[in-house]
Amino acid sequence: MPDDSPTPEQDVRRLYEEAEARVAKAAERVVSRDSFGELLAMATENIVALTRMSFDGLDLVWSNLRLAGRRDITRLARQVGRTEDKLELVLQEVERLRHQVEDESIPPAPARADGAKPTAAKSATRRRSQHSSAP
């Protein structure tokens, strides 16, 4: 007559599956409650607050060591951006003034006998020769 008693391996597997099923049911009961959501929200808020405090503390350490911190680098980046914008405006104004001076200093091109206007290359050559011969 065959022995119908379970083997130790089968007993362990059965006990494991029962424990897993009980833990799953308990976890589902805990997660399904509103209090779990509130607890999760409070834990998240605390983690965010601790992270912010640690970054602020690290910035304070950098400041006390006289090293550039995150805030310093961000502030410098903003200042560099503003300076670049101002330089771009100055460059545009210089270009505008340069064109204005060039237009005022070039006399109108003499009319050609055939009625054609001088080409751009000839006008540029004339401009260069006028600027180079100036005292």
Image: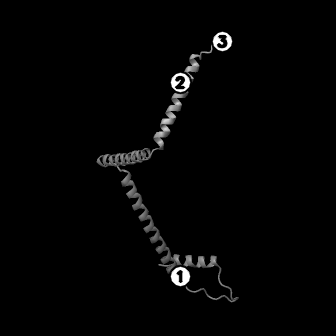
Disc 2 is placed on an element classified as helix
Does residue 126 sit above or below 65 in this rendering? below
- What is the spatial separation of the Cα atoms under label 2 and label 3, in whole angstroms? 23 Å
Helix, strand or loop at label 1? It is helix
Q: Nearer the viewer, residue 100 or 3?
A: 3
- What is the distance, in whole Å, between disc 3 and disc 1 at their CAs? 113 Å
Q: CA distance from mark 1 to mark 2?
A: 96 Å
Reading the image, the residue beneath label 1 is 103
Q: Which residue is mark 2?
A: 15
Q: Residues within 10 Å of mark 1 (few under 14, many from 20)?
A: few
**Kind of residue at disc 3:** Pro
Amino acid at dot 1: Asp
Q: Earlier in the sequence, mark 1 or mark 2?
A: 2
Q: Quadrant of residue 36?
A: top left
* Callout in the foreground (3, 1): 3
The image quarter containing residue 80 is: bottom left
Mark 3 vs 1: CB contact within 8 A: no
In the picture of the structure, the residue carrying the numbered disc 3 is 2
Is 125 above or below relative to 21?
below
Where 77 falls versus 128 (above or below)?
A: above
Of tags 2 and 3, the one toward the viewer is 3
